[in-house]
Image: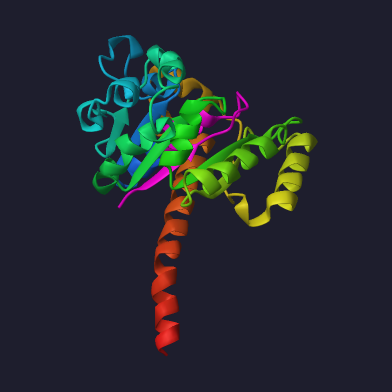
Amino acid sequence: MGKIIAVANQKGGVGKTTSSINLAASLAALEYRTLLVDADPQANATSGVGFDPKDIQNSIYECMVDGINAQDIILQTTLLPHLDLMPSHIDLVGAEVEMINLPNREEKMKDALRPLADQYDFIIIDCSPSLGLITVNALTAAHSVIIPVQCEYFALEGLGKLLNTVKIIQSRLNEELEIEGILLTMYDVRLRLSNQVVEEVKLHFQQLVFDTIIPRNVKLSESPSFGIPVILHDAESKGSLSYLNLAREIVEKNIEAADEPEEATEDTTA
């Protein structure tokens, strides 16, 4: 069964969409069947893998509000053979209002995505920069959450609020939800401030912080304008190599987690 991972932080400009697109593309490049879910009304993840949001007929909005089968809205990208997209549309802005009176409104995305988990190794959800109903839906549907944090002065601002939201969802809506990791982004090795933020985040969150740190990189900034992930724009760039390393780190972590129960059983038997 596939792992559903939400990429979330209510703070804007921390690299959520960049990370969602490039992590999904890197997993696909490593030949893992990957579905990128665009749960942001801005639809940047949709355009970032080569689709024009204006041409989208059915999106995750129709899935959540109208109950359209998720299987019917999935688009196969022409970029990488193992990468599919569940697109977004500006209509998603109104979903929170339209869903307010629906029963189990926090579980609409879970109802759409969980049946797809058998078809994919990884499902990556790009969340909007808020802690509204759509993000709550994403966290309720997910098995884990990646929290991007930029290496800048206000890095930890609002992080406590997001972690509190995760705890609430764990206790009320989704006991399975775990923190996959905190991802440091926009790192500039030349800046003392960047290094201070890295040290502070690692001091506070220790094992929760990914070993991989995403640097500031021109190729990462350029690739969305071409509608392709950075791995197809410049495979040798620091940005591309960093997201490939992140993908490998996540794969290894999940393989180890899957092996742990077996080892425990063997030890008990012994």
Q: Position of residue 47 (x, y in %)?
A: 38, 19
Residue at image point 61% right, 52% down:
208
**Would you place residue 16 above or below residue 199 in this image?**
above
Foreground: 32 or 6?
A: 6
Q: Quadrant of the C terminus?
A: bottom left
Residue occupying image coordinates x 45% and y 31%: 126
> Residue most toward the bottom?
270
- Name the colouring of the figure: rainbow
- The residue that appears at 62% across and 50% down in the rendered structure is 209
With 140 as the anchor, is 189 left or right in this view? right
Segment colored magenta: 1-23
Q: How many marks?
A: 0
Residue 166 is situated, as x and y percent measured from the top left of the image, at 57, 42
Q: Is residue 247 above or below residue 55?
A: below
Which of 237/134 is in front? 134
- Is residue 141 a member of the stretch shown in magenta? no
Name the image quarter holding residue 29.
Answer: top left
Taking the image as shown, residue 231 lies to the left or right of residue 199, namely left
Judge by depth and name the residue closer to the eye, 64 or 190: 64
13 magenta-colored? yes
Residue 68 makes an appearance in the image: yes
Residue 214 can be seen in this image? no
Instruction: Answer left or right for 254 relative to 146.
Output: left
Q: Residue at x 75, y 52 (%)?
A: 203
Residue nearer the viewer, 104 or 174: 104
- Residue 141 picture location, percent across and down: 41, 40
In the current view of this chain or complex, which residue is farthest to the top? 54
